[in-house]
Image: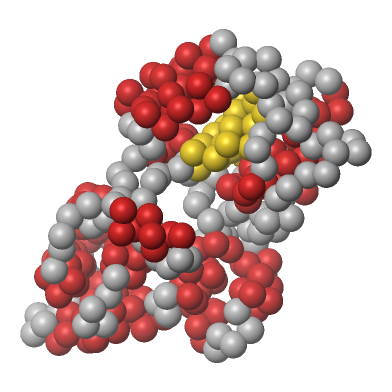
Amino acid sequence: MSGLVGHDVQWQEWRAAIDGGRMHHAWLLTGPSGLGKAGFAKDAAAELVAEPGVPQPPADHHPDIIVLSRLPASTDDEKKREDGKPYATKRSISVDQVRAMQRRLTTRPTLGPKRAIIFDSADDLEKSAVNALLKSLEEPPVGSFFLLVSHRPGGLLPTVRSRCRTLRFQPLPDAEVERIVAEREPQASADARTAAVSAAHGSPGAALKFIENDLAAIRRELVRIVEEGDSDFSRRGALAAAIGARPDRERLLASVELARTICAESAALASRPFQARLIEAHTRLTRFGKEIPYANFDAGLAVVEIGGLLAAAAAPKDGR
């Protein structure tokens, strides 16, 4: 299975629906990012379309499984994807992608009577793409089943949510996340694993990315800025060193996400004035993070912005 772990309840619900003979045509897979929802969707789709006695290719190459996600941002990024290298993506899943999928639904499935369409993720659909998708959800072609992955289902249109059966994925216990990290990243130090589990909040995927991007030093400097301030800019200098002179967008985005998480964690225990500053920093970091994938940021200035927002929110010496 390509999904991470901890999905026994979800598999029971999915398989009961298949065995019950009344399979809903659209499913909304919800929960925080990094829980393995997309992997579950591919495995579940493979089970759904499989026909006894008919050889089945892997889900990523199955003719009856369509996966819609953000496309590479340019022809150069398309080549990077083909070469297995990191690549930038477009801002959203476009209406043209949805319409191309709908044209395929007018044809018969290849290896059996069923076809599965996965959106990874539905949160990335542009407005016109959502409107186009609604037509398929309202009048699904016979044998077509939709699996919509969503990390933020509250942002989806109520008309989309109402046409889907929701399958919820919950964060895992820290002990289970620790086990997965130790199994997948055995070379990581105990300190790095501990920091990854703490930052992940029950998301194995987030913990693994933490290790992969070597974020422990970045998290340490971000926490110090919030706790101690940075009146002489020395902490921001240490943060810049931890992030690196030429970080890629993924590393910058991971740093922003860490900063947001630290603000949220600190706000839960802060005094009211301190809490208000942390909430403001969290809001501005969220906006900043949305701009990074699509703007031509100078990495150094981006680091200064992240550190500056935390420094402005930092706990004052009197604790207020």
Based on the displayed image, in which of its 4 quarters is residue 91 positioned? top left
Residue found 78% across the figure and 18% down from its top: 22
Image coordinates of residue 202 in percent, x first then y, are 57, 60
Q: Is residue 167 left or right of residue 112?
A: left
Image coordinates of residue 305 in percent, x first then y, are 15, 66
Q: Nearer the viewer, residue 49 or 55?
A: 55
Q: Tell me, yes or no, if residue 59 can be seen here.
A: yes
- Total numbered labels placed on residues in the image: 0
Above or below residue 315? Residue 194 is below
Image coordinates of residue 143 in percent, x first then y, are 70, 20
Based on the displayed image, in which of its 4 quarters is residue 215 positioned? bottom left
Based on the displayed image, in which of its 4 quarters is residue 226 positioned? bottom left
Q: The C terminus appears in which quarter of the rendering?
A: bottom left
Q: Is residue 134 left or right of residue 60?
A: left
Q: Nearer the viewer, residue 273 or 190?
A: 190
Residue found 42% across the figure and 32% down from its top: 97
Image coordinates of residue 237 in percent, x first then y, are 17, 85
Residue found 58% across the figure and 36% down from its top: 66
Residue found 36% across the figure and 76% down from its top: 219
